[in-house]
Amino acid sequence: MSEHKPKLRPLPHFIFMTRWLQLPLYVGLILAQCVYVFHFWVELKDLIGAAMGNEEALQHIIQAVAVPGTVAPTRLNETTIMLVVLGLIDVVMISNLLVMVIIGGYETFVSRMNLDGHPDQPEWLSHVNASVLKTKLAMAIIGISSIHLLKTFINASAYDAKVLIAQTGIHIAFLLSAMAIAYTDRLTTLTHHDSKSH
C-alpha cells in the first residue's frame, strides 16, 4: 500500500514556495564568480607578460600592487611576484567561498540537487546543513583574511602601526568568531544526540 504525502494547505504551500525567490541571488553570485574568473586571467596574463619583458604588463602589475608612500619598483622582483601571486590566491579563495555559498546555500535553503552517487559530488555536501555551512564559511573568511594580512605585512614599513594593529585585531576577531561558531555547533550537536538517546 503506497503512502500518500500530506498535501499542504494553500497558505503554507505559498510560503514554502517563496524559497525560490533566492534563486536569482544565487544566479547573481554565479555571475560574480564569472567576473572573478575574468579578473584572475587578466592578472595572470599581465604577470606572465611582465615576466616575458612586456613593459605595459609590468606597469599594470606594479600599479596593482603599489602601496602609497613606497617607491615603486622599476622591474619585476620577488616581492612584486609574491604580492601578485597572493592576489591570485585571494581570488581563488573567494571563488571557493562563492562555490560553497552557491551550492551549499541552494542545497540547504532552496532545493535538493540529488547529487548522491555523482563522482564529482563535494565531500562536504553530503552532510551540509546551516551549521556546517556557517562553520565552513567562517574558515574560508579566515583564509582570505590571512592572505590580506600577509600582503600587508610584506609591505609593513609602508603602513602606520595603527593600521597593522587594526588588521591584526580584525583577523583575531574572525578567528574567535569561527571558534565560537564551531563550539556552538558542537554544543548543538551534542544536545541533539542527548535528546535522541533519552
Image: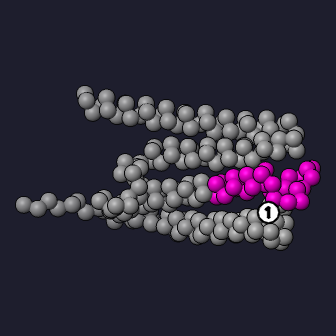
What residue appears at the point 49 percent right and 67 percent down from the top-left corner?
A: 23
Quarter of the view holding residue 143: top right
Give me the residue at 71% from left, 39% from top.
Answer: 170
Say if 123 sits above or below 24 in the image. above
Q: Position of residue 194 (x, y in %)?
A: 31, 29
Residue 60 can be seen in this image: no
- In the rendered image of this protein, does residue 93 appear above or below residue 35? above
Q: Is residue 130 left or right of residue 31?
A: left
**Label 1 Cα crowd, 10 Å radius (few <14 / some 14-19 / many 20+):** many
Q: Which residue is mark 1?
A: 61
- All told, the count of numbered labels is 1
Residue 138 counted in the magenta span: no
Q: Position of residue 75 (x, y in %)?
A: 85, 60
Q: Nearer the viewer, residue 134 or 77?
A: 77
Identity, as a three-letter code, of the amino acid under mark 1: Ile
Q: Which residues are magenta?
A: 65-91
